Amino acid sequence: MANGRLNRRAVLGGAVGVAGLAALPAFAQDSSTEFTQPASATVRNNISSFRMLQWQDYFENTRKGAILVDITSRALHFWSEDQSIYRLFPTSVPLSEDLTRRGKTSVVQKVVNPSWRPTPAMKERNPEWPDVVEGGAPDNPLGSRALYLSWTYYRIHGTHDTRKIGRKSSNGCVGLYNENIEELFEYAVVGTQVLLI
């Protein structure tokens, strides 16, 4: 304030301060250090608990590279054979526990613009689905790249539907953003170790 006159900045600053004080009594009424989630707060179900992991806790070595898929945190970890490259990618994971497979497998094939065919179980659940969606199609569930695993029907693949990443949304496979699967595709080789936990 210059010469006893109010300026716009002083008025706006005072309004913000009053608004902030109005909210203060809700938190300052008790001396507790506990934070209680307001009843009106929304709960998000796709929050991932990303954490960096050490390959030594899961693999004996990194020969041909190592991929660890953590279903709980919805994250894929990759270590190169010489351990100079470490990547952490968000993933989609299976919709339910009965669609989830855990354990050791490996990459047996790498495919650019893979065609998608529903499994017999998928067709049984969804008879209206097409028998095949050709590679490169915008509605192809495998996206732009796929790493085929030694388990029948299981893949690590891309997706054009980015809403699926970070969620339980697949029929058993592990999905990544297309740009992430394209990066992983360059690092992984046939024989790369894969562990799903």
Image (cartoon, rainbow, N blue to C red):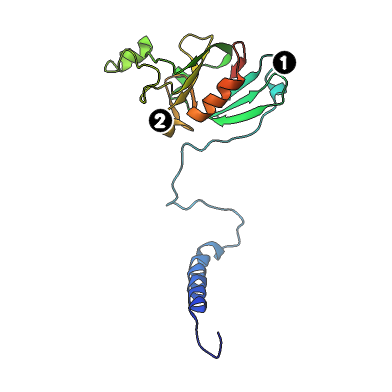
Q: Nearer the viewer, mark 1 or mark 2?
A: 2
Q: Tell me the quarter of the image containing the C terminus.
A: top right
Looking at the image, which residue is at 35% across and 25% down?
139
Specify whether residue 159 is in view.
Answer: yes
In front here: 160 or 196? 160
Q: Residues within 10 Å of mark 1 (few under 14, many from 20)?
A: few
Dot 2: element: loop
In front here: 81 or 102? 81
Task: Tell me the kind of residue under disc 1.
Answer: Glu
Q: Tell me the quarter of the image containing the N terminus.
A: bottom right
Q: Residue 93: horizontal and vertical position, in percent?
A: 48, 25
Looking at the image, which residue is at 60% across and 58% down?
32
Q: In the rendered image of this protein, does residue 106 appear above or below residue 90?
A: above
Q: CA distance from mark 1 to mark 2?
A: 35 Å
Looking at the image, which residue is at 62% across and 56% down?
33
Disc with the residue nearer the chain's start (1 vs 2)? 1
Report the residue that reaches farthest toward the left. Answer: 128
In front here: 192 or 145? 145
Q: Which mark is residue 161?
A: 2
Q: In the rendered image, which residue does mark 1 sit on? A: 60
Q: Residue 110: horizontal and vertical position, in percent?
A: 53, 14
Specify whether residue 91 is in view.
Answer: no
Q: Residue 14: horizontal and vertical position, in percent?
A: 51, 76
Q: Residues within 10 Å of mark 2 (few under 14, many from 20)?
A: some
Task: Tell me the kind of residue under disc 2.
Answer: Asp
Dot 1: element: loop
Q: Residue 66: horizontal and vertical position, in percent?
A: 64, 19
Q: Which mark is residue 1?
A: none
Residue contact at pointers 1 and 2, CB within 8 angstroms: no
